[in-house]
Image (cartoon, rainbow, N blue to C red):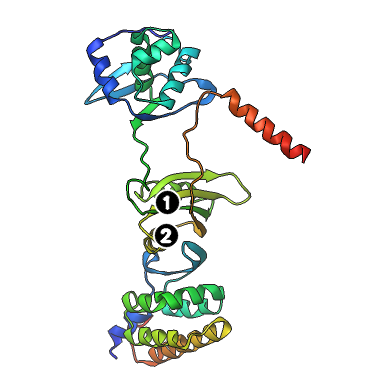
Amino acid sequence: MFSYKFTASRSKTLRRKQRNFYIFPTANNKFKRKSLHIGKGEATLKLKNNTLDATDYKILAALQEDSRETYTSIGKRLGIAHSTVYDRIKRMEQNGIIKKYTALVDAEKAGTKNITAIMTIYTDPKESEKVAEKLGSAPQILEVYTSLSEELQIIAKVVAQNQETLHDFIANSVAPLLGVLRIRTSILTKKFKETQFSIINDPKRLTFIKETHNIREES
Amino acid sequence: MNADTVSKILRTVSREKAFYFFTSIGNYTGESASSLKEFMGKINEVNLKSLEFHLYRGDFEKWISEVLQDEELAAEVRKLQKFSLIGDALRNQLYVTVSRRLKRLMSEPSPTRI
């Protein structure tokens, strides 16, 4: 179990700051003890127990649904005190499990007319890491992944104002990178789904997958 | 044409300023050229789609003009767009245009040429 300390005034401040957030799950649901930077100062936080328990997961699931939900509301739903919710969230923030709170913006409704594309970059294995790192530093690149396949590939999501700026960026900033062998780019036209990975396995989703699978088998 | 101009046009440019051959927006073929001589060689190697893509976007003339700084060749390549060439006819005509220019430049006296 964690050791908790409740501070009412800080709780209110943090509650106001709540937004959608990202969670960084680690192997076997464990996280390492480490030094953390809090604001301008530095503090070391050590957990008595280095695993998340069921309550932590329920809190994370609640925040993933709506990160602006108050500690009181989450506490009521889970049958625990709001101070417990606060302390657990605070600890998960300090340990980097909750990475940040942010707003999911519908770019179309916000009036931006950017285009998004997926680049598959075939690379020389020796240079692959460097290529991925350089891509990651470009503001146009939203996500970068390496892929396990016959040929070593880097997959990156890129945003640009229009097709011309997309082409210019790829021709002037990606193709010249040492180790880039060739590039395939697909411009995305319509979004059917976008969601964050939920750390809780939703049984309903599993049922949906099973049902879909059965239908395909029968047909 | 003075020797400095000729050697400037015939120089090998950095990786960042090389010409990268694409077949369409964002689809890089893996072929690039860092000098006029290399560019001429690539004309016979790259996919025809790539030649058509770049010629009609004006990419060849832009690179020849801005990077190699050969306005004469850039103007000749620009003229090719008017003929609406496609396929092997485009490849052949582009090759002839570039090789003719290269031959002229190579025949210019230039003690500094590499």
Camera-nearest residue between A133 and A26? A26
Whole-percent x, y for residue A186 in the image:
51, 56
Q: Are marks 1 and 2 in contact (CB under 8 Å)?
A: yes
Q: Which residue is mark 1?
A: A158
Q: Which quadrant would residue B33 be assigned to in this image?
A: bottom left
Element on which disc 2 rests: helix
In the image, what residue type sits under mark 2?
Ile
- Left or right of B101: which side holds A203? right
Work out whether mark 1 precedes mark 2 in sequence or the reverse, and give the earlier one.
Answer: 1
* Marker disc for residue A170: 2
Quadrant that contains the N terminus of chain A: top left
Tell me if I can see residue A47 in this picture: no
* Towards the viewer: A99 or A187: A187
Look at the picture and state if A178 lies above or below B91: above
Residue drawn at (33%, 28%) of the image? A19
Closest to the observer, A171 or A32:
A171
Amino acid type at circle 1 is Val
Q: How many marks?
A: 2
Q: Quadrant of the C terminus of chain A?
A: top right
Give residue A202's quadrant in the image.
Answer: top right
